Every structure is written in structure tokens, then in C-alpha cells.
Amino acid sequence: MTEDAKRPERAQALVDFQAEKDFFIGIDSDGCAMDAMNIKHQECFTPSYIKYFNLQGASSLVRETALFVNLYSTTRGLNRWRALARVFELLKQRPEVLERGVKIPEGKELQKFLDSGYPLSDQGVAAFAAEHPSEEIQQCIEWGNGVNELIAWMVHGAAPFPGAREAIQAMQEKVDTIVVSATPVDALEREWNEHDLAKYMKVIAGQEMGSKAEHVRWGAKGKYADNDKIMLIGDAPGDRDASFQEGVLFFPIKPGYERESWAQFKDEALGKFLDGTYRGAYQDRLVAEFEALLPEKPTWQTV
């Protein structure tokens, strides 16, 4: 399948975008620019795991596992469908869960979807289910819909992190800025407009428009003088990986140190980006500090 053939229709906005400035920065939303990641996972995603997969008998363990996967480990910020599979995987390795007799979904049909090449979005899983119906994948769809409903009901007033607005404003003179996120576009538009930040973004790109690497590829690659004029700002290893996959720069917003990170970007890193001295030892140091904050493996007992 060609690149054009597999590109989601809504991603055309990225392809059509033309550079207006000499530099480009893609900015992740939840947990990076917006303080919306914790509330979404603590109050929306995690209760939905428990409800839709009938995990009430191990609710505390499910909550601990889900938050580790989505917030406190190297899988922080992972696409919701891949994170769902990871939650199932870790729960099946916990003896305390097995002792309670709680039935964890096998995850086989979910894995087939993840391996299918369908977009990892609400639309993608619905299209997969239409071709490959199963009880498990329907349960996953109901979970995803439940998460979306809870987010729309619960997440209001989740403001930008301190310093994010000022940093975004400081970019505007010389930098084209877009949102690069795995969150559904409707939620992104609602949240960025609620806080009057959408006006600074050339495009608001969410999960329906491809992966973060694809957002950078379609929105920026080849439209600027070189890759050192393209940067992704994010708070998760997946953001780092998307940047490095596309050969562009990465600035980490360190979980738990968001205020300090945005201040550092505005006062120090932005200048290095604009004068061409960001890549190399400076970026390497920031990435190493970021990576030290997120463990790969949980500390609890596994089988």
C-alpha cells in the first residue's frame, strides 16, 4: 500500500500545510502543554478499564497497573489501544490478580487489530470490527466509547501547565506551531479553544490524522531547510521516538517538572534551536535527564 493510500483522509490538512516561517515545532497536548493527562487517566481511562472489562474484583490492582502503563513508565503516552493490550499483559502477570479469580481478557482479537495495519483510532477499530467481528473487539470498542464519554463529561478547565502559554507565544515570531497528539481531534479542539491556545496553531493534529511521526513527516518534512529546523516537544518516550524516527529535534517536558521544563525551553532551549546549536550535547543531556524519570519494569511481583 502506498503512503498516499494509507494516509487518513483527515491528515490532508497536514499535507496541505505550507511553511510560513523558517522553523517548525510540533507540540504534544496531554501531559505536555495541557495538564489534562492525569485527570484523564485517573478519572476516565482507569475506571473504564474496571467497568467495561468487569475487573471490579481487582480494582486497586487494575488502577495501579493502568497508571503505571499510562503515566509512570516508559509506555507513558502510548496510544490507547496499545496501552490497553499492555494493561492486559501486566495484569495477567500479577499473582494478586490471579489469586482473586478475576478473568482478564485474552487480548488476542485486540492484538490482531494492533497488527492489522488499520489506523489505531476509534475509526480504525470500528473498521476492523466490521471486517473481523468478535465479542472481545466489541468490548474494546465499548470501552473506548466509554472513555470518550467520560472525558467529555469530566475534563473541563484542565489548564495549560504554568509557562506553556508564554513559551508558545515566544515561538510565534519565527516558528510555525502545530499540535501533535494521539488524543482524538474533537477533544483537542475543545481543550485548546477553551484556553485560547488554538489560535496559535496552524493545525491541530490528533489520532485520526496518523501517528505522531506521521504528523511530523506530513506536516513538516521537506518544508523547511533541514531537520534541525524541525522540533517535537513532548512528555513521553513515544514523542522522543517519533522525533528520532523522523530525524528531527526533541525537547522533553519532564513529568513532574513541567513548570521548570517550559521555563527552560523559553529561556534557554528556544534560543539554541533558533541559532542552530540545539542538536548534540545539549539535546543529549536533556533526553538523558528525561529518560531517568521513567522506569521500564514495575516493582511489583510478577509470575
Image (spheres, helix red, strand yellow):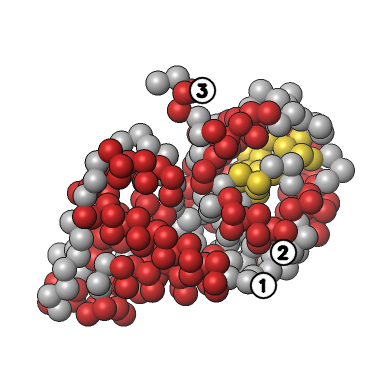
Alpha-carbon span between mark 1 and mark 2: 8 Å
**Which residue lies at the image location 27% right of the left edge and 52% below the top edge?**
137
Q: Residue 110's spot in the image, x, y percent?
A: 27, 49
Binning the other alpha carbons within 10 Å of mark 3 as few (below 14), some (14 to 19) or many (20 upward) gives few
Give the CA separation, mark 3 to mark 2. Answer: 33 Å
Nearest the viewer among 117 and 239 is 117
33 to the left or right of 133: right
| Label 3 SS | helix
**Location of residue 186 by image quarter:** bottom right
Give the mark nearer the N terminus: 3 vs 1. 3
Q: Horizontally, is 204 left or right of 74 in the view?
A: right
Q: Residues within 10 Å of mark 1 (few under 14, many from 20)?
A: few
Dot 2: element:
helix
In the rendered view, would you say 209 is above or below 224? below
**The quadrant where residue 205 appears:** top right
Which residue lies at the image location 53% right of the left edge and 52% below the top edge?
A: 184
The residue tagged 1 is 157
Residue type, label 2: Glu
The numbered mark, 1 or 2, whose residue comes first in the sequence reads 1
Helix, strand or loop status at disc 1: loop
* Mark nearer the N terminus (3 vs 2): 3
Return the residue at label 3: 4
Quarter placement of the C terminus: bottom left
Instruction: Indicate the amino acid at tag 1.
Output: Gly
* Residue plotted at (30% across, 42% down): 130
Disc number placed over residue 38 in the picture, else none: none
Q: Are marks 1 and 2 in contact (CB under 8 Å)?
A: yes
Q: Nearer the viewer, residue 124 or 206?
A: 124
Residue at image coords 35%, 60%:
142
Image location (x, y in percent) of residue 44:
46, 70
Residue 194: mark in rendering? 2
